[in-house]
Image (cartoon, helix red, strand yellow):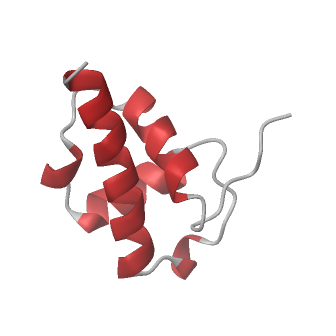
Amino acid sequence: MPKDLTWDDAEDIGILLSEAHPQLEPLSIRFTDLHGYVIALPEFKDDPKKSTEGKLEAIQMAWHDEFLDRTQA
């Protein structure tokens, strides 16, 4: 059974976003769009209103790490 993700699961969310949106460069994404991508993930079960700039930044950086691993491999 897949784990229900929350705003604190930045690394797991970053991996899923990298798989869901492989064409996007994460650092070019506005936080409002990033928020929408996160809450659209089927595994995401947290309250959408509990996001913070810090949590979104952590998710964006985790996604960026995945992006770099994929594009620089």
Task: Residue 6: name its quadrant.
Answer: bottom right
Residue at the limit of the structure toward the left, as seen here: 28
Say above or below: 8 vs 54. Answer: above
**Could you tell me how many numbered marks the image carries?**
0
Q: x and y percent of residue 67 in the render?
A: 28, 35
**58 or 53, which lies in front?**
58
In the image, what residue occupies the spot 41% across and 49% down?
Answer: 37
Residue at the limit of the structure toward the top, as seen here: 73
In the image, what residue occupies the spot 38% across and 34% down?
Answer: 18
Task: Residue 46: name its quadrant.
Answer: bottom right
**Quadrant in which the N terminus appears:** top right
In the image, what residue occupies the spot 27% across and 66% down?
Answer: 31
Residue 7 left/right relative to 54 = right
**Quadrant in which the C terminus appears:** top left
Residue 26 left/right relative to 65 = left
**55 or 51, which lies in front?**
55
Say above or below: 54 vs 18. Answer: below
**70 or 16, which lies in front?**
70
Residue at the limit of the structure toward the front, as seen here: 73
Task: Residue 22: name its quadrant.
Answer: top left
Residue at the limit of the structure toward the right, as seen here: 1
Q: x and y percent of residue 27 in the render?
A: 17, 53
Say above or below: 26 vs 50. Answer: above
Q: x and y percent of residue 51 in the render?
A: 49, 76
In the image, what residue occupies the spot 51% across and 51% down?
Answer: 11
Q: x and y percent of residue 34 in the render?
A: 33, 57
Residue 59 left/right relative to 22 = right
